[in-house]
Amino acid sequence: MALKGKCFSSLIQMLGTRSAAERLAQLLLLMAEMGGQRIGDRIIINRTLTQDELARLVGATRQWISATLERFREKGLIEVAPDRIVILDEARLRCSR
């Protein structure tokens, strides 16, 4: 229950204070913290949320999520597969806009 409260608190703060790209990056980092598997410098997030669900969580459209995930991928921040997202560069993702 405490973990759920932390998650919702973080999401509420993100919605009011950050750009949509920052909110998505923060959500990915939060998902990594809560259930990611660190292997070396990478963090594997077993993907349980659809792009529609990610969009609702960060206050964006599914199309915007798809385009932003692609931009993150092109910058070498993440890899995206149907069943997981891999954070390749956690430090840069934290600073991502």
Image (cartoon, helix red, strand yellow):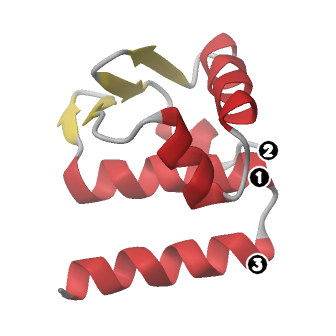
Q: Identify the residue at image location x=43%, y=36%.
A: 50
Residue type, mark 2 in image = Arg
State which quarter of the image contains the N terminus. Answer: bottom left
Q: Which of pointers 1 and 2 lies earlier in the amino acid sequence?
A: 1
Numbered circle sitting on residue 84: none
Q: How far is disc 3 from disc 2 in space, using C-alphas?
A: 15 Å
Residue type, mark 3 in image = Gly
The residue indicated by pointer 3 is 16
The residue indicated by pointer 2 is 97
Asked if residue 43 is positioned above or below residue 5 in the image, the reply reads: above
Disc 2 crowd, CA 10 A, few/some/many (<14, 14-19, 20+): some
Instruction: Determine which quarter of the picture holds residue 37.
Output: top left
Q: How far is disc 1 from disc 3 in space, using C-alphas?
A: 10 Å
Residue 94 image offset from top left, x and y in percent: 60, 49
Q: Identify the residue at image location x=21%, y=51%.
A: 35
Asked if residue 10 is positioned above or below residue 33 in the image, the reply reads: below
Out of 79 and 59, give the one closest to the viewer: 59
Residue 85 image offset from top left, x and y in percent: 38, 27
Nearer the camera: disc 3 or disc 2:
3
Left or right of 73, for residue 41: left
Residue type, mark 1 in image = Ala
Q: Identify the residue at image location x=52%, y=34%.
A: 51
Nearer the camera: disc 1 or disc 2:
1
Numbered circle sitting on residue 20: 1
Residue 4 image offset from top left, x and y in percent: 28, 78
Left or right of 7, for residue 15: right
Q: How far is disc 1 from disc 2 in space, using C-alphas?
A: 8 Å
Left or right of 76, for residue 83: left
